[in-house]
Amino acid sequence: MIKLRHILGGATALLAAGFVLAAGADLGQAQKQATNWTAITMFAIFVGITLWITKWAAAKTKTAADFYTAGGGITGFQNGLAIAGDYMSAASFLGISGLVFASGFDGLIFSIGWLVGWPVITFLMAERLRNLGKFTFADVAGYRFDPGPIRSFAAMGSLVVVAFYLIAQMVGAGQLIKLLFGLEYTLAVVMVGAIMMIYVLFGGMTATTWVQIIKACMLLVGATFMALAVMFQFGFSPEAMFAKAVEVHAKHDSIMGPGALITDPVSAISVGMALMFGTAGLPHILMRFFTVPSAKEARKSVAWATTWIGYFYILTFIIGFGAITNLIPNPADYFVGGELAKGLKGGGNMAAVHLSKAVGGDLFMGFISAVAFATILAVVAGLTLSGASAVSHDLYASVWRKGKVDSATELRVSKITTVCLGVLAVLLGIIFEKQNVAFMVMLAFAVACSANFPVLFMSVLWKDCTTKGAVAGGTVGLILSVALTVVSPAVWEATLGNPKGSALFPYASPAIFSMTAAFAVIWIVSLLDRSAQAAKERALFPAQLIRSETGVGSSSASGH
Amino acid sequence: MKDDIVERIQKNPKFLKMVSIRNNYSIIMSILMMVVYFGYILLIAFNKPFLATKVSEGAVMSVGIPLGLGVLVFTIIITAIYVRRANTEFDAMKDDIVKEASK
């Protein structure tokens, strides 16, 4: 407890230092400085409340189960909000509204893609995950498979997804905070890393869950207010809003139809597959299903999560159009040098933030800026927790110590890993500062759908699947999805700076090839696997089926 | 004790019936979702002009917007329908099977 108080004190000092720097950096622009103070105050309140919750959660986090899953005591409704808080990243809030602002209709394509994975999780995975798993999704595949290879693979798959997602979040956080609060990039990244580490280290899953719930509520309330304010301007007539948008937007009527976002059908389907099935392979999302007490609550959580996330995406679409109709007629206030052609101040992703000022003044803009920062913290905390559980539960406790380890030791290893991951996240954030990381989230989805999803799906639903097949197929999917992304235009040309047209792989996402290859290899290798171990694994399938379908024997009191 | 329950559930024909009803339902719902989503994606890939058609003469809104928002709403509704049936009907079947086996 004393240690916690010290660290909380340190964080407060760090925040205070940040404020001083913020004030110093912006002395030249009086108006901007005032805005920053509102945002910083609101954010400080958020951090204060969440640290207080962390202190409360720390008292409840005594065992490894508390740390990974909040003791399984979260309700379906709470977990649904937390999943929404974990999933609605700054990229989807600022990114989608920015995309709608830039090209109208095209923004809708991404928001749909990001939602359609949820029914797949509901219909095929949620209940089985809850019944078979304990702390990580590797528990599910590890039920009947040889723990060494399958858990090593699952931990690798988790860590790769977490790493790419984390880099995207950290770099985004640094840029955003630099812009909204006027802080130095490095200081911003260190602050995010430090606060996130306090949440996870002391409060574990309980604190992370509540940070995500609070953030989800703030984001939903803020976005609802903005969308209502926009609709109010047009007497709640979408037609009037679209008419005004078409009138003022440089692309005029073409914002009403699909544009250049999707050009070839292969990319269209491939991106669609990555988003639809990748969601069902994201370790930080899958982990959330172990925090509820029963399969029933697990299903309720996805129903709520889908509702909130879907509602939120409808709001971002209205917000994007609101930004078109509110910002473009006032170039002097929102555009670089007052010229439309030079783009929005702070870049295209700032559409929602500028709109918040247009409809709610400086105070509301401060609120939305604080929400954007809180969003990053909540997502980063969830990612770190799932990375830490992959290392401590899968690699350390199950593979290395072969399950012969007490809860206290496992908890200690989780905490050490959390610190390592936090430091690593900060370092990666600093290393990638000047890189174009837009492809990283898509890469995380590609790996999730090509490595984690096929292994989970086949191990649970196909009785003949074996360890060798799952590990071989998953590894092929993992390597192929990363390799093809590296030689695709987004990385080869846009990030590595090779000449246009030189990318070996012409499509926007590798999923259609890498996911298919993973399934094919799992199938073929499993069929060819005639080892004694394989026979033992197949014989365990009926027992696994009963547990996955009824929950009999599943971990922690499932209420039956 | 636990192994006993597992064995009894395995022998209960109601169990296999429940698994097949529920799996069929899951698969049908998944296919329905995929048809709607990939149908929309394929429209974007192959028939952009259709999505850009106006909803009515003289309107600004294009067909693609209500269709796209419709996919979002459909996603929420299909999830809710499944969860409702699973949490009532399927869970009742499951509880019944587990109760019989625990006797």
Image (cartoon, coloured by chain):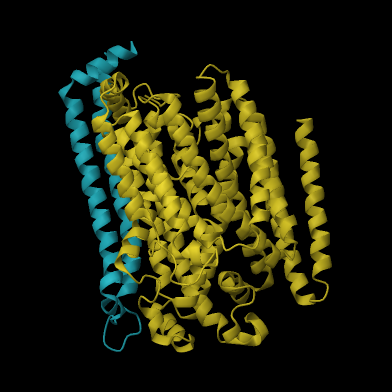
Displayed quadrant of residue A147: top left
Q: How many marks?
A: 0
- In this rendering, does residue A329 appear at all? yes
| Residue nearest the observer in this picture, A182 or A227 | A182
Residue located 46% across and 81% down the image: A234
Q: Quadrant of residue A281?
A: top left
Position of residue A239 relative to residue A179, above or below, is below
Question: Is residue B80 shown to the viewer in this render?
Answer: no
Quadrant of image for the N terminus of chain A = top right
Residue placed furthest toward the top: B1
At horizontal 28% and vertical 60% (from top left) the residue drawn is B38
Place of residue A533 in the rendered image (x, y in percent of width and height, measured from the top left):
32, 20
Residue A219 x %, y % = 55, 58
Would residue A420 appear left or right of A507 to someone viewing this image?
Answer: right
Q: Is residue A493 left or right of residue B7?
A: right
Image coordinates for residue A104, horizontal then vertical, percent: 43, 76
Which lettered chain is shown in cyan? B
Q: Is residue A167 left or right of residue A452?
A: right
| Residue at screen point 34% across, 59% down | A270
Q: Colour of chain A?
A: yellow
Place of residue B54 in the rendered image (x, y in percent of width and height, measured from the top left): 29, 82
Q: Quadrant location of the C terminus of chain A?
A: top left
Looking at the picture, tell me which residue is in the foreground, A41 or A10: A10
Left or right, residue A70 beside residue B61:
right
